Image (tube, rainbow, N blue to C red):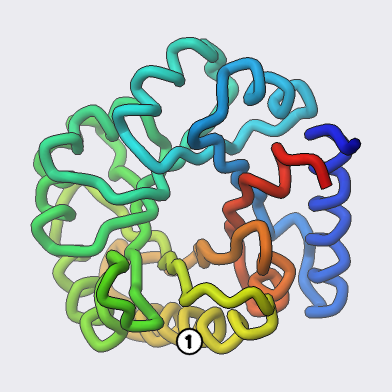
Amino acid sequence: MSTPSANLDQIRARIAAACERAGRDPADVHLLVVSKTRTPDEIRAVTACGQTLLAENRVQEARDKIPLLNDPALAWHLIGPLQRNKVKTALELFRMIHTVDSLELAEEISKRNDRPQPFPVLMQINVGREPQKSGVLPEEAIPLAQAIARLPGLALQGVMTIPPFSPRAEESRIWFRALADLRERIAREAFPGVQMRELSMGMSHDYEIAVEEGATLVRIGSAVFEPS
């Protein structure tokens, strides 16, 4: 039975192999371990292996869990939906929010951020146009990026997606390519303060495909914590 340490080693090796296939530097790809529903002890087993980037889906769960870890070396990202009434708490807990999907949410983050530095955010894009999923539609991405660029207190640093699920990882490739194309289109607009550095895409079953298509942040949970 594999351990989180062995799983992490295997995931990092596969990321490196995907980078080699794509002619990329593995240092450009960052692994976010998704710790939703995991206990503090389970998370400590991962952080003991040197993993410092973690991600949560719910503000409430993170608010209860992060103080129990009490580790300033950890950097937490929010990868789930964010309600405007939880923005203040999210800003206190997280280093980056991946799920900005409306101007109203961006405005609330702008208003609530009282730090001297702009807060890093990603725009969530619903590349598969699935009605049950959050995210702006592809044709809304450039207008929203332009509007976000006008807001003080936040920095749009890239885009994120959750593609339509398929048991065949290869079928995610078209959606990852679509997101990478949108990132390039937004970058060409050269909106002030907008830096399209990040592509947040790829999860436990398709992260290697995501890396081949340019992912800089991959969000992996079950492949880390569950025996393989």
* Relative image position of residue 225 (x, y in whole percent): 70, 37
* Relative image position of residue 195 (x, y in whole percent): 40, 65
Instruction: Look at 39% across and 87% down and name the residue there.
Output: 185
Q: Nearer the viewer, residue 149 or 75?
A: 75
Q: What is the count of numbered marks?
A: 1
* Rendering quarter of residue 182: bottom left
Image height check: is 41 above or below 84? above
Is disc 1 placed on a helix, strand or loop? helix
Badge 1 crowding class, 10 Å Cα cut-off, few under 14, some 14 to 19, many 20 or more, is: some
Q: Nearer the viewer, residue 142 or 59?
A: 59
Instruction: Look at 80% across and 69% down and name the residue there.
Output: 19
- Say left or right for 165 vs 1: left
- Say left or right for 78 vs 146: right
* Rendering quarter of residue 144: bottom left
Q: Nearer the viewer, residue 182 or 132?
A: 132
* Relative image position of residue 120 (x, y in whole percent): 36, 48
Q: Which residue is mark 1?
A: 178
Instruction: Look at 56% across and 29% down and name the residue there.
Output: 38
* Relative image position of residue 101 (x, y in whole percent): 24, 63
Quadrant that contains the N terminus: top right
- Say left or right for 31 vs 111: right
Instruction: Look at 13% across and 44% down and name the residue there.
Output: 84
Q: Nearer the viewer, residue 126 or 183?
A: 126
Q: Amino acid at mark 1?
A: Ala
Image height check: is 188 above or below 32? below
